[in-house]
Amino acid sequence: MPGVFPVDLPPGLFAVISGVLGLLVGSFLNVVIHRLPKMMERDWRAHCAELTGEPPALGEPLSLARPGSRCPACGHAIRAIENVPVFSWLFLRGRCSACAAAISPRYPLVEASSGLLCAYAAFHFGYGWAALGAMLLIWCLIALTGIDLDSHLLPDSITLPLLWAGLLFNVFGTFADLPSAVIGAITGYLSLWSVYWAFKLTTGKEGMGYGDFKLLAALGAWLGWQMLPLTILLSSLLGAVIGITLIVAAKRGRSVPIPFGPYLAAAGFLALFWGKPLTRAYVGLL
């Protein structure tokens, strides 16, 4: 997208504002990670009930906005002062103020990750549309990582809009030229689709889900096809190292499925910020 925003900001101030915005959005990402799989399951059950003619199961309406945040242990409604990103968790010492039930450290971790990555995106890309696009990509990758870790799902409601958003930003060459973005989306999908079918035809088992294809297609749409070899290499290396570590150190069985989405997301972060120098270094080794 040509040009920058109408009002210029000093780099340091822009990074601080972006970091604060990242913290606030990170709090919402925790809601997305927790509720979106539940909403998907409810929709699936409602469709099944409709097909079978059974009455749908009635329950409290659930959306990303309703009901308000509350403690899952005692139902205590989270007050605004208890919902300040990172700081409330530290002030409460990771406990519910009503029942003292433990609050997962993942909540401040998601918020802090969002804040730090957004601040770095502002510093790295400078004041303009590239930083805004990078933040949008960061938020989606964080949400997909948390959801995949919890439920082994990569929702179409995030991956598909993310793909189209990448193409839209690159209409103006924000991260890659548009032909590279389109080829990246197609190649990203087909590369993992081919691996999926090769593995299934060879072993009779499914090695990954269709959400992984769509996520890599989205990364190709954002970063261009030139970043796909690096993204696939880094995600495979991360998956292998962490998978072997879990098997050896945590004595996790080899048959236990490991979500691939978080490794794709981590590789996407690295490619977003340092893709070109990493690619040059990799090609230099060859």
Image (cartoon, helix red, strand yellow):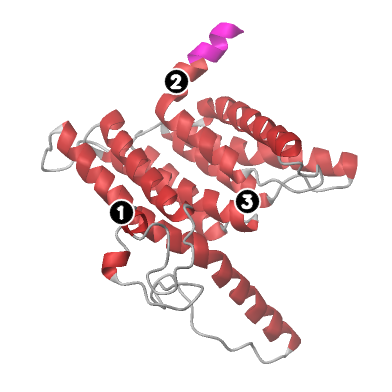
Q: Earlier along the polypeptide chain: callout 3 or callout 2?
A: 3
Callout 2: helix, strand or loop? helix
Residue at 41% across / 68% down in the picture? 96
Q: Nearer the viewer, residue 104 or 95?
A: 95
Q: Nearer the viewer, mark 1 or mark 2?
A: 1
Q: Which mark is residue 211?
A: 3
Q: Is residue 69 above or below residue 245?
A: below
Residue topped by disc 1: 87
Magenta-tinted stretch: 280-286
The location of residue 110, given as percent across then percent down, is 43, 50
Residue topped by disc 2: 276
Q: Quadrant of the N terminus?
A: top left
Q: Earlier along the polypeptide chain: callout 1 or callout 2?
A: 1
Q: Is residue 174 magenta?
A: no
What is the three-letter code of the residue carrying label 2? Lys
What is the three-letter code of the residue carrying label 1? Phe
The location of residue 231, given as percent across then percent down, is 56, 30
Q: Is residue 262 left or right of residue 47?
A: left
Callout 1: helix, strand or loop? helix
Disc 1/disc 3 C-alpha distance (Å): 34 Å
